[in-house]
Amino acid sequence: MTNQRSDDNNNPLLNSGIEYFSDEVKRSGIMNYRSTALPTWCPGCGYYGITHGLANALKNLHVNNNNLVIVSGIGCAGRYPFFVKGYGLHGIHGRALPIASGIKMVRPEFTVLAIGGDGDGLGIGGGHLPHAIRRNIDITYILFDNAIYGLTKGQASPTTPFGQYTKTTPYGNPEKPLNPILIGLAYGASFVAQGFAGFPQDLTIVFQEAIQHKGFSFVVVTTPCVTFDHANITYQRFRNIWKKIPEDHDKQNLANAMALAQDGNYYNGILFQDHRNAWHDVQQSIRKNTSITK
Ligand SMILES: Cc1ncc(C[n+]2csc(CCOP(=O)(O)OP(=O)(O)O)c2C)c(N)n1
Ligand code: SF4
């Protein structure tokens, strides 16, 4: 596999001689998980922080690039597979989860990540989330939650706060937003975590745990859309409101995780983890003709 993309020859920045990646980044080994394609995201977009956090996690886990598959839907977040050194599938809007599930079902040895924005994953693709979760298929789903439709230039999304002004809500959003963490917990995800794009080091830890978890891992990353949202998710507003998960929080206690998800705070880290059988374990037990165990 090569991390040189065929369209690199036409990339003006790469051909300009400007060093895009610092020596420190190059020495860190992180470039083994970054393609040479340069992101087309707006300068300052939270997606850069997520990219850094995830590349670091893949590096720390020594994930084999030849076994790495990133599946995305459509949106600014959907461009993600272009920037990772591994196999990538930029799919259709809202369909990252069924595609990723299918890949993992037939190639269980692959590390499969599904990526998508809040519109992709909770709007048009919202019907797929409960089914991927209830199958407990061993993939990691990272929801890039900027509470806006970025690619289509700033319409309200399923997580836009009540009252927020957007292109489609000129008098303020009249609808209540979804709470993705609570949804993940209520559907029964075996791993639910959250983080902030402005804290890439913390994201690395969460992503590592999510990828290592055997079963469906749901990671919600709150991330600023610096171009179309100047009021809600901004670095200035969000940097100081994140809280550490209380030390006495029991990750296996669903009711406590649900309480944290609804108390109005943002908690950085893993809220819930349940070590139950993943989809492939159940399949294996069926193949062995033994009874299905929970
Ligand atoms: C079937 C279909 N409907 C609508 C669109 C238009 N569309 C493209 S991206 C997008 C929203 C993306 O928002 P989000 O998933 O939040 O991702 P972001 O761009 O913010 O990363 C929409 C509505 C489309 N491409 N395909
Ligand atoms: S429009 Fe928003 S989400 Fe899309 S790249 Fe720009 S800042 Fe990021």
Image (cartoon, rainbow, N blue to C red):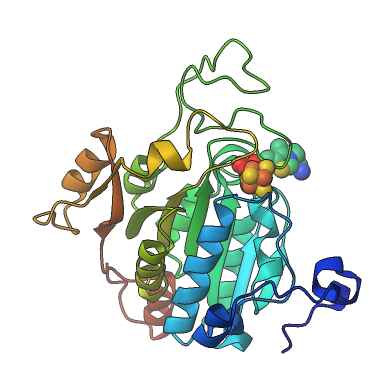
Quadrant of residue 193 within the rendered picture: bottom left
Q: Is residue 182 above or below residue 290?
A: above
Q: Is residue 212 visible?
A: yes
What x and y, as percent, mark residue 160? Answer: 51, 29
Residue nearest the viewer, comparing 196 with 211:
196
Is residue 157 toward the left or the right of residue 241 in the image?
right
Residue at 60% x, 76% y is 22
Quadrant location of the C terminus?
bottom left
What x and y, as percent, mark residue 40? Answer: 74, 57
Is residue 225 toward the left or the right of residue 271 in the image?
right
Residue nearest the viewer, comparing 14 with 54:
14
Q: Is residue 107 visible?
A: no
Residue at 81% x, 68% y is 13
Question: In the orientation shown, which residue stands out farthest toward the top?
Answer: 171
Quadrant of residue 70 within the rendered picture: bottom right
What x and y, as percent, mark residue 62? Answer: 47, 87
Is residue 94 toward the left or the right of residue 144 in the image?
right
